[in-house]
Amino acid sequence: MNFFEHWVLPPTCVVTGLPAERFDLLETLFLALKRPDDVCPVCCEWSLKEGGKRVLCGACLTHPPAVCRTQVGFYFSGLVRQFVYDLKYHQKPEYARLLAEMMVAEIGEELKLSGVQALLPVPLFSLRRRDRGYNQAELIAKTLGKLLGLPVLNQSVFRIKATPSQTQLTVKQRYQNLKGAFVVESDAFSSFSHIALVDDVITTGATMQVLASCIQRKTKIKCIEAWGIAKTK
Ligand SMILES: [Zn+2]
């Protein structure tokens, strides 16, 4: 929130209705959220600690993924899960801003130091976007871009295949499902070497991996990070 917004619309907790501080969630509720800190820096799955730092997991060591790093604010549970559901399925687009503000409050310093030059929201297929009225990843990226001073690349990648919901699929089926799903407008990426894909929730990371590979094939981008509000456990 900027000063003017803060003055006109002071933060009010969406859960309790009480006056809040930094954003529309009470600080005590925010501090109780679970952040993944025992995970591999590349894929965000559990990994070992060595010398005080998390090391790459076995899967990333043997098959380095297309995504160079994964950064998420929280685990997909409790209030974060509820806010994401409301954002996606209960027509609450305003929760995109709250979730992005919470993510920056949690890991903003790491995001700023990442070297990322631009954000790319994971696109939705046009019909799904029309049904919902918005793409939640675009709304999240818009607030992240504003708070971190990063441009958002809209209309740079298109999802041309109506991929059915991925939730019930195995990892292999997810990759199969996403084959030929994206078209990349390579010119849009010409001035960048390091970008982040933005989505609401990262589950297996299959969507991010497929999208990152497509972009790498069509552009000169070296490093593509995956940023999500939350990661499923
Ligand atoms: Zn890993």
Image: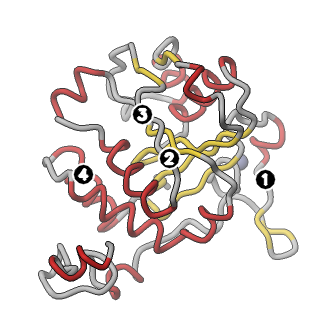
Give the camera-side residue of 26 and 39: 26
The local crowd at label 1, few if under 14, some if 14 to 19, many if 20 or more residues have their Cα within 10 Å, is many
Look at label 3 and name its amino acid.
Asn
Mark 2 vs 1, N-terminal side:
1
| Residue sitting at x 46%, y 62% | 75
Q: Quadrant of the N terminus?
A: bottom left
Q: Which mark is residue 151?
A: 2
Between the residue at mark 2 and the residue at mark 1, the CA separation in whole angstroms equals 30 Å
User: Badge 3: few (under 14), some or many (20 or more) residues near its Cα, within 10 Å?
Assistant: some
**Which residue is disc 4 drawn over?**
85
Dot 2: within a 10 Å radius of its alpha carbon, few (fewer than 14), some, or many (20 or more) residues? some
Residue 76 point in image, percent of width and height: 41, 58
Task: Name the residue tied to disc 3.
Answer: 154
Q: CA distance from mark 2 to mark 4?
A: 26 Å
Q: Earlier in the sequence, mark 4 or mark 1?
A: 1
Query: Looking at the image, what colour scheme do you see?
Result: secondary structure
Q: Does the beta carbon at disc 1 come under 8 Å from ligand 1? A: yes
Secondary structure beneath dot 1 equals loop
**Element marked by disc 3:** loop
Residue 209 sits in quarter: top right
**Real-space Cα distance between discs 3 and 4?**
23 Å
- Image coordinates for residue 25, horizontal then vertical, percent: 27, 77
